[in-house]
Amino acid sequence: MNLKENLISLKNTFINPTCTLVAVSKTKPNKLLLEAYEAGIRDFGENKVQEMSEKAEQLPKDIRWHMIGHLQRNKVKYLAPFVHLIHSVDSLKLLKEIDKEAKKNERIIQVLLQVYIAKEESKFGLDEVELRTLLHDEALAKLDSVKIIGLMGMATYTDDEDQIRAEFRFLKNLFESLQNEALPSNVELKELSMGMSGDYLLAQEEGSTMVRVGSAIFGERNYQ
Ligand SMILES: *Cc1c(COP(=O)(O)O)cnc(C)c1O
């Protein structure tokens, strides 16, 4: 199967056809991204700042670039002029930096807060208490050049479907409970980014609005 046929059959499996497909193109050459672009994809996900910046420079300007990997504060300035959505924000310090760079570029940058839902050890993501603390921090309301539009989570890497489903369900419940809370005006929770090649269907069943799919589109990667 070629890439276009791959994409069509992937889309045909979607339980929720309005779910946004972010094509995760990390490590893949521009040639393959262009093939996906020609097949209609406009949302691409990358996890390294330099790689994403280079690709953005070389590829069509109507692509929406999603930063899905851990982001260091000192690299925000490189993404700020063009990034469409940062999925992996997990601290107030990082939000402040994004706000600062957004102002320099006279734009508002949309972000998701990454929530830690997996069983396995991970350095990244907020737990529920940290998430609530951040959302109610007075300093957050002052960041008027960032907009928090949802949450992102990654399930445990396992074959245990019940486990994965429970983790997605936890995130969805948290999302809905926060939607009913009074939050600052720069928070409008509408996107739930969950699901990858191995679990995007489970994620859609549990209410995902955005899936990040790499290997099921572009083939296996040799490295992360
Ligand atoms: C690499 C990556 C993906 C895509 O993974 P696949 O299993 O190839 O679909 C999704 N989300 C994040 C955060 C990633 O780093």
Image (tube, grey):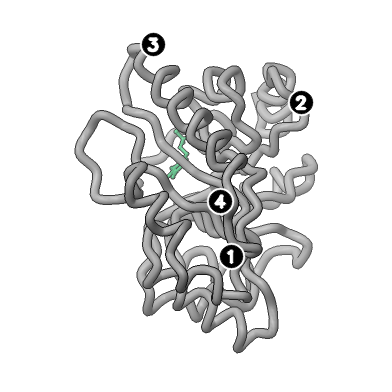
Q: Nearer the viewer, residue 193 or 96?
A: 96
Query: Which residue is under mark 3?
Result: 162
For badge 4, the amino acid type reads Gly
Of mark 2 and mark 1, the one earlier in the sequence is: 2
* N-term mark: 4 or 1: 4
* Residue 194, horizontal then vertical, whole percent: 52, 35
Mark 1 closeness class: few <14, some 14–19, many ≥20 residues within 10 Å: some
Label 1 amino acid? Lys
Q: Amino acid at mark 2?
A: Pro
Q: Mark 2 CB in 8 Å range of ligand 1?
A: no
- 10 Å crowding of disc 3: few (<14), some (14-19), many (20+): few
Q: Is 221 positioned to the left or the right of 21 in the image?
A: left
Identify the mark nearer the N-term, 3 or 1: 1
| Closer to viewer: mark 2 or mark 1 | 2
Q: How many marks?
A: 4
24 up-or-down from 53: above or below: above
Looking at the picture, how far across and down is residue 111, in whole percent? 56, 59
Judging from the image, what secondary structure is the residue with disc 2 in?
loop
Does residue 117 appear to the left or right of 45 in the view shown?
Answer: left
User: Which callout, 4 or 1, points to the residue nearer the camera?
Assistant: 4
Residue ID for mark 2: 17
Q: Which residue is mark 4?
A: 45
Residue where numbered disc 1 is placed: 55
Q: Is mark 3 within 8 Å of ligand 1?
A: no
- Tell me the SS state at disc 3: helix
